[in-house]
Image: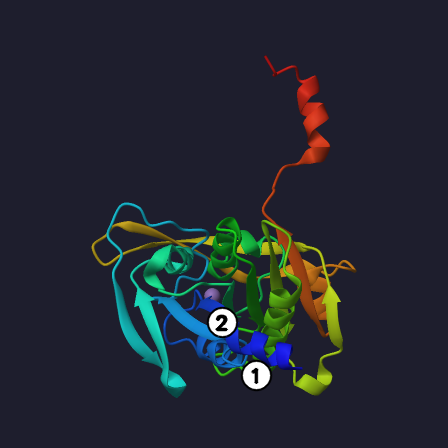
Amino acid sequence: MDNENTRNETRRPMGILVTNDDGPHAPGLVALALALQTVGDVHVIAPNRNWSASGHVKTMHEPLRAHAYTLDSNVPALQISGGPADAVALGLMGLIDAPIDLVVTGINRGANVGHDITYSGTVTAAIEGAISGVPALAVSLDTYDEHADYAVAAQIAADLARKILEKRLPSKTLLSVNVPALPKAQIRGIRITRMGTRIYRDALVRNTDPRGQPYFWIGGQPPTGIAEPGTDFWALANGFISVTPIQLDFTAYGFMDTLRDWETER
Ligand code: MN
């Protein structure tokens, strides 16, 4: 018992870097930061605007600015002029003067399922953590409701953060979590899932601006998906929290031998 106490006294708190892609004042960000304060020391670095669907960004051709601000509930934070992955990169490279053991992103307004993860600033910020060798967790809530309740998603984020810190993740692997926008009592449980298939219904809107110049806008309907059993989309459609392990190796191993048969190797 004495040993246990000594260990706890000398062990430093876990450092958790939190960012999002919905911007510095998004309610999902503060909900996530507050929940994670029960797990470790939380350092928030938010992008300065809504960077949703920005993909994996690295700002290299202009300066990045950072300034302090305060989230609701008096959570101290930084906001930067770059995107979500920039926030993680800056934090891990020294903008945060403390060791970072875990990167957690979100809570995003809107699910990130199937190939959404390649568009998502939320997931790509977590990918930045994984690339840098830090375990990472991306959290998204399956609603676009501006008044959504992030409490359930925040709780599951804290639970999974504890689990990751205790059990670790494999190298170059992150978790993407999607939470149904349902009251807690109606959520049926948690399922480990694979990436499903999103069906994008984008449509090009062409119009003319007030100066007479044409412009284009990617419009259309919100995406749907195929609720194939075992997928992230299926879990959400059936009232389960979806937890998908994501690996950074995109190689299509099954195609390599066929490609060799093309005799392109020299
Ligand atoms: Mn977003």
| Residue 196 occupies quadrant | bottom right
Q: Is residue 244 above or below residue 11?
A: above
| Residue that numbered label 2 is attached to | 12
Which of the two residues, 21 or 94, is positioned nearer the viewer here?
A: 94
Camera-nearest residue between 96 and 57: 96
Q: Residue at x 54, y 69 (%)?
A: 110
- Specify the quadrant that holds the N terminus: bottom right
Residue 181 appears in the picture as rendered:
no
Q: Position of residue 180 (x, y in %)?
A: 64, 74
Towards the viewer: 164 or 1: 1
**Which quadrant of the view contains residue 252?**
top right
User: Whole-percent x and y of residue 154?
Assistant: 56, 78
- Amino acid identity at mark 1: Ala
Q: Is residue 22 left or right of residue 197?
A: left
Label 1: element kind: helix
Q: Position of residue 224 (x, y in %)?
A: 63, 61
Going by the image, does 95 lie left or right of 155? left
The crowding category of the residue bearing disc 2, from other C-alpha atoms within 10 Å (few below 14, some 14 to 19, many at least 20), is: few
Q: Earlier in the sequence, mark 2 or mark 1?
A: 2
Query: What is the x, y in percent for residue 57?
Result: 40, 51
